[in-house]
């Protein structure tokens, strides 16, 4: 009886730790840039800004962390590669726990980002979570022989390889397009004005804060209210920093601007960049659309790609694309209300029927 209870407790601990690591890795895999932004914040808080001179370092670390957490969670769930998985899980928790204690004391980074945008915990909640996981992982290491393997030893390599390939595929497709699963407040289908309203409960805040558009030149038709109250369609080219924007698909962007002008839709670029970057972008791309300013953090929250495209209709987000997945001429054969991309149910991987 004692052995049976011991076995039950150990395997419950296994399921809790494995589920946590799979979930943590998965929500990071579908939004690698979100984790990269959080790593950037950690570098700044830890006075390691010099590392940011290597622009690919945050996204590389983001992918490595996401793949590692996801795969370790899968390995532990199936109880394969037990010694390696438990050693790495315990090592990660020995790193995460003091780090989150420092965050809880100093509040140097407001949100640790351990579950991406899917689940927000306070820094103290995160610290307590890591303490519990560390205790559970120590129990698992001590009683690892009681872990039940769900698959035969001969197919361990299949699960090991598959989990790596699946995680890399998820990260790759989410970098190429926008996040595969969008946990952010600016998701397709969101009615922005409603999300900006203060709830009746005074302890809660609006889902969307600080969304404000300021015209680059004096233009009463290019401000927050005019855009959100427009009952027609509005294309917003999103670029937090134009000086770092990818211009490889500029011909398609300009074609979308021409399409918008043809059908009387608004098209403008939202950026946090200054005059020199805007003028450089205009000279480089021949952009003839107007520009407007918005908060850098808000723009990074709206879209991960730089640039990206947002389509609004009556204040509702009906489409979002990275610069790799922009609609082409085959999808723009008439006014938007007659096309699939003009409706919130459309996704970039769908074909135009």
Image: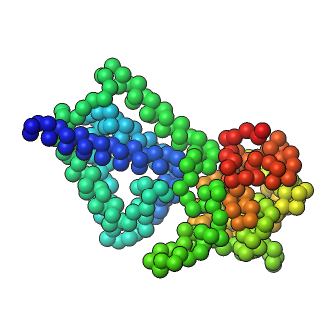
Q: Which image quadrant for residue 260? A: bottom right
Q: How many marks?
A: 0
Q: Residue at x 75, y 49 (%)?
A: 341
Residue 302 visible here = no
Q: Residue at x 56, y 77 (%)?
A: 198
x, y (%) of residue 165? 48, 32
* Left or right: 275 as drawn, with respect to 202: right
> Of 304 and 132, which appears nearest the observer?
132
Q: Residue at x 47, y 80 (%)?
A: 202
> Of 253 and 279, which appears nearest the observer?
253
The colour style of the image is: rainbow
Residue at the right extreme, as displayed: 262
Which corner quadrant holds the N terminus? top left
x, y (%) of residue 51? 47, 56
Q: Which image quadrant for residue 279? A: bottom right
x, y (%) of residue 258? 87, 54
Which corner quadrant holds the C terminus? top right
x, y (%) of residue 326? 73, 47
Residue at the top extreme, as displayed: 154
Residue 171 visible here = yes
Q: Is residue 200 above or below residue 169?
A: below
Q: Residue at x 32, y 66 (%)?
A: 124
């Amino acid at each position: 009886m004692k052995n049976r209870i011991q076995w039950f407790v150990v395997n419950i601990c296994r399921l809790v730790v494995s589920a946590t690591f799979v979930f943590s890795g998965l929500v990071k895999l579908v939004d690698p840039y979100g984790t990269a932004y959080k790593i950037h914040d950690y570098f700044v808080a830890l006075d390691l800004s010099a590392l940011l001179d290597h622009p690919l370092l945050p996204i590389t670390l983001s992918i490595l962390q996401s793949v590692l957490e996801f795969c370790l969670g899968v390995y532990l769930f199936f109880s394969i590669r037990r010694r390696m998985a438990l050693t790495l899980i315990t090592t990660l928790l020995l790193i995460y726990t003091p780090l989150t204690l420092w965050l809880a004391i100093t509040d140097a980074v407001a949100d640790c980002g351990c579950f991406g945008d899917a689940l927000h915990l306070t820094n103290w909640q995160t610290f307590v979570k890591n303490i519990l996981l560390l205790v559970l992982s120590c129990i698992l290491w001590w009683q690892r022989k009681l872990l039940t393997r769900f698959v035969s030893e001969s197919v361990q390599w299949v699960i090991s390889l598959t989990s790596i390939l699946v995680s890399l595929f998820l990260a790759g497709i989410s970098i190429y397009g926008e996040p595969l699963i969008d946990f952010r407040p600016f998701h397709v289908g969101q009615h922005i004005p409603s999300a900006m309203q203060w709830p009746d409960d005074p302890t809660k805040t609006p889902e969307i804060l600080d969304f404000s558009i300021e015209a680059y030149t004096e233009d009463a038709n290019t401000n927050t209210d005019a855009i959100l109250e427009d009952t027609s369609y509005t294309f917003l080219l999103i670029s937090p920093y134009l000086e770092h924007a990818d211009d490889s698909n500029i011909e398609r962007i300009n074609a979308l601007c021409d399409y918008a002008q043809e059908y009387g839709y608004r098209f403008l670029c939202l950026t946090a960049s200054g005059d020199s970057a805007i003028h450089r972008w205009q000279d480089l791309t021949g952009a003839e659309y107007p520009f407007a300013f918005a908060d850098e953090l808000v723009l990074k929250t709206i879209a991960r790609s730089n640039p990206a495209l947002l389509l609004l209709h009556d204040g509702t987000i009906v489409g979002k694309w990275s610069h790799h997945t922009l609609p082409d001429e085959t999808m723009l054969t008439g006014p938007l209300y007659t096309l699939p991309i003009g409706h919130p149910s459309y996704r970039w991987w769908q074909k135009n029927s």
